[in-house]
Amino acid sequence: MPTNIALNKTATASSYIAPFSPSRAVNGQTTALQRWACDVLPAELIVDLGEYYRINTVVLKFMGLAGWSASYNIKGFTVLGSTDNSNWASWESDSGNTASSFTINAANKPARWVKMTVNSGWGLNCNLNAASLLEMEVTESAIDAYLSNLTISSGTLSPAFNKKTFSYEVEVGSGIQSVSVTPTADDPTHATIRVNNQTVTSGSPSSAIQIDPGLNTITLTVNNQGIQETYTIKVNRASTTVAYLSALIVNSPRNVPVPLDQTFQPTTLNYTATANYPSVTVIPTSTGNQIKVNDVPVDSGTPSSPINLNLGTNNITVKVTPGAGGSTTTYTITVTRNS
């Protein structure tokens, strides 16, 4: 027998006649004393199921099931569902009911909240200004289009994965250029999974997904017999860090500074100089970053090994990369040796 997922859940109403509170309409009892009743219309009764569900049926049980005359059954009502308790979708409406039990086929629609409304003039068949409900029962769809697990190759899902949580965020460093995700279906036999519209086998990683600096959205859909759930992961890649030199000096073999053609500026990347020496050294400064002179590592603020100069032009490169990874900045010094 399907489980009644409304049983003993939180129920609220626009009003009620004490002691017939809305909680009595979800306590599993169908005696006359265990009912919700109100005498102010329009009225509504809302049941919070506690989490997201795909709904199969909603059953409304009226006073005829407690042995009362069918004239005490509600004549008219509307049943609605919502995932946010704000936007409501109407599932069924009846203004001429006489039955003691009414079953609504919700056709696997999504909801956390289920509401019954009774308009003015739609009350009990014997008293159109009052309403009374013995029990609201709700059952979940047997078709499962959820994931049972979801992992990502870099970073950590926030919040932690829950199959009924559909939106996640992940922070990754600036050096991460791609990620893959591994989704696992609750029902791998029948469900089809797509990641950014590419089919992925349940429990297997997706192809690499390019991640650009800033916000990137990964969309996963799970489809099972016409029911589709959609999960999204927003991956925030840190903006690419750029490192610069704070100082750059060229020295002769006797540590005499070789003048550059212009005053050094961190964002000016090309310089020229004239040095009539057999060699020069370069002293680059960039605290906390990785520095290479002609592709040879050099500590910040210390001279490079001597760089031999040929007659004519000689290009010296100084590359600086953020210590935590990121974009490399390349400086070029063109040194001319005339003699």
Image (tube, grey):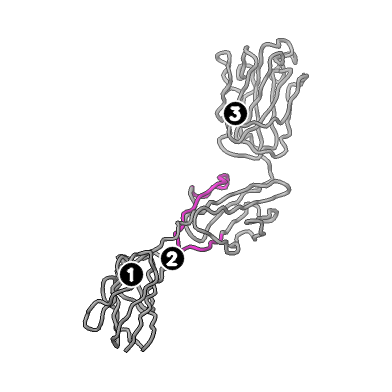
Q: Is residue 237 left or right of residue 87?
A: left
Instruction: Relative to 47, say whether 298 is above or below.
Output: below
Q: Foreground residue, 161 or 287?
A: 287
Q: Which mark is residue 262?
A: 1
Q: Which mark is residue 133?
A: none
Q: Quadrant of the C terminus?
A: bottom left
Cα gap from disc 3 to disc 1, whole angstroms: 75 Å
- How many C-alpha atoms fall within 10 Å of the one at disc 1: few (<14), some, or many (≥20)? few
- How many C-alpha atoms fall within 10 Å of the one at disc 2: few (<14), some, or many (≥20)? some
**Disc 2 and disc 1 in contact, CB within 8 angstroms:** no
- Secondary structure mostly taken by the magenta-highlighted segment of the chain: loop
Q: Which mark is residue 327?
A: 2
Where is residue 205 shown, x and y percent of the image? 58, 62
Q: Is residue 266 left or right of residue 194?
A: left
Q: Quadrant of residue 92?
A: top right
Q: Earlier in the sequence, mark 2 or mark 3?
A: 3
Where is residue 245 shown, x and y percent of the image? 33, 67
**Disc 3 and disc 1 in contact, CB within 8 angstroms:** no
Q: Secondary structure at mark 2?
A: loop
Q: Residue at x 66, y 36 (%)?
A: 139
In this orientation, does residue 1 appear? no
How many numbered callouts? 3
Q: Amino acid at mark 3?
A: Val
Q: Earlier in the sequence, mark 2 or mark 1?
A: 1
Q: Quadrant of residue 93?
A: top right
Cα gap from disc 2 to disc 1, whole angstroms: 25 Å
Residue 55, magenta (yes or no)? no
Front tag of 2 and 3: 2
Q: Foreground residue, 55 or 258?
A: 258
Magenta stretch: give its range.
Answer: 159-180
Q: Which residue is mark 3?
A: 47
